[in-house]
Amino acid sequence: MNRIGIYYAYWTHDWDADFHPFVDKVADLGFDVLEVNAGTIGNMTSEQRRSLKAHADDRNIGLSYCVGLTKQYDLAAEDKSVRDNGIAFLRTIAGAMGEMGGGNLGGIIYSSWPATLPAGVTDKRPYWDRSLASMKEAIKAAEDNNVFFNMEVVNRFEQYLLNTCAEAVAYVKAVGSPHAKVMLDTFHINIEEDFFSEAIQTAGEHLGHFHIGENNRMPPGYGHIPWTEIGAALRQIGYKGDVVMEPFLMPGGEVGRDIKVFRDMSVGLDLDAEAAKALQFTRGFMK
């Protein structure tokens, strides 16, 4: 049985947050996992991390972690000092997660977010090569801390390096570590892939983390994503990992700005009630 989770930023306007209230909220709603901002975890004190982990354990909630590296941490940058900063940042996050028992780190951790190729550049191979060399260094910290780095496949409007599952599989194979995995997200699959089931099957044993959300970033059940097909494909490859929903409904703040939420999709909705409904919907197609 896959654990079902939700990303804390469904309820927030800013990326930094106190995660303790969300531990209680998701536990009360019936979720198994709370996904939090890995950057915030990295900046906490050891005491703060222990407190959060103890709280989550007390409520029987698992924790997963996500981040999109900003430009100063770009593992694919031409500037070696920027790449070194990115490697150091991932090492810090891996160490922080290790203090909390390890687990899954997902997101755009192989370059920066958002990012596009410079004007006039069409060959991304040099960026790929620099990213890969950086990741081969950073992944050692994951191996040492029982952490898995999940490379998120995202759409062309947010990043340029890994837009398809096939690209991500090639990347993690090149990293050459069992702690390097692929992360898929149904919102991005809907934009870039030919078929949902084909993308999931391409990931196969390399799939380490799975995000779900509708084509319009609403919770599952409010769009045209083929959930029955997705559930069947995940069962077919024997995926045992977490399934974490990542809806974004509210404009405003850092989250609304960065996710490009320009209309309030939460009008008339109770966010907690919608999360609970989406949880039951997800458990239904994941059976």
Image (cartoon, helix red, strand yellow):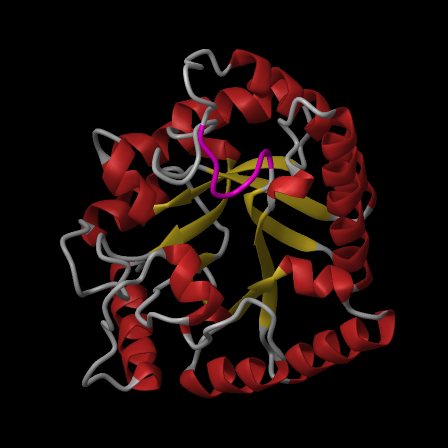
Rendered location of residue 90, percent (x, y): 73, 44
Could you tell me which quadrant the N terminus lies in?
A: bottom left
In x, y percent, where is residue 194?
21, 29
The reply to whether the magenta stretch includes residue 113 is yes
Q: Is residue 123 visible?
A: yes
Image quadrant in which you'd find residue 37: bottom right
Whether 257 is drawn above or below 73: the answer is: below
Q: Tell me which residue sits at (49%, 56%) in the image.
A: 242
| Relative depth, front residue between 120 and 214 | 120
Which residue does the image show at 28% across and 59% down from the upper left?
217
Region in magenta? 110-116
In percent of width and height, residue 223 lies at: 16, 59
**Which corner quadrant of the image does residue 17 belong to?**
bottom right
The quarter of the rendered structure image containing the C terminus is bottom left
Position of residue 44 in the picture relative to residue 265 (left or right): right
Q: Is 237 included in the stretch rendered in magenta?
A: no
Q: Find residue 16 and report its image quarter.
A: bottom right
Give left or right: position of 46 versus 79. Answer: right
Main secondary structure of the magenta stretch: loop
Give the residue drawn at x 56%, y 39%: 112
Q: Residue at x 30, y 69 (%)?
A: 249
Q: Nearer the viewer, residue 79 or 280?
A: 79
Relative side of 22 to 278, left or right? right
Q: Is residue 148 above or below residue 129?
A: below
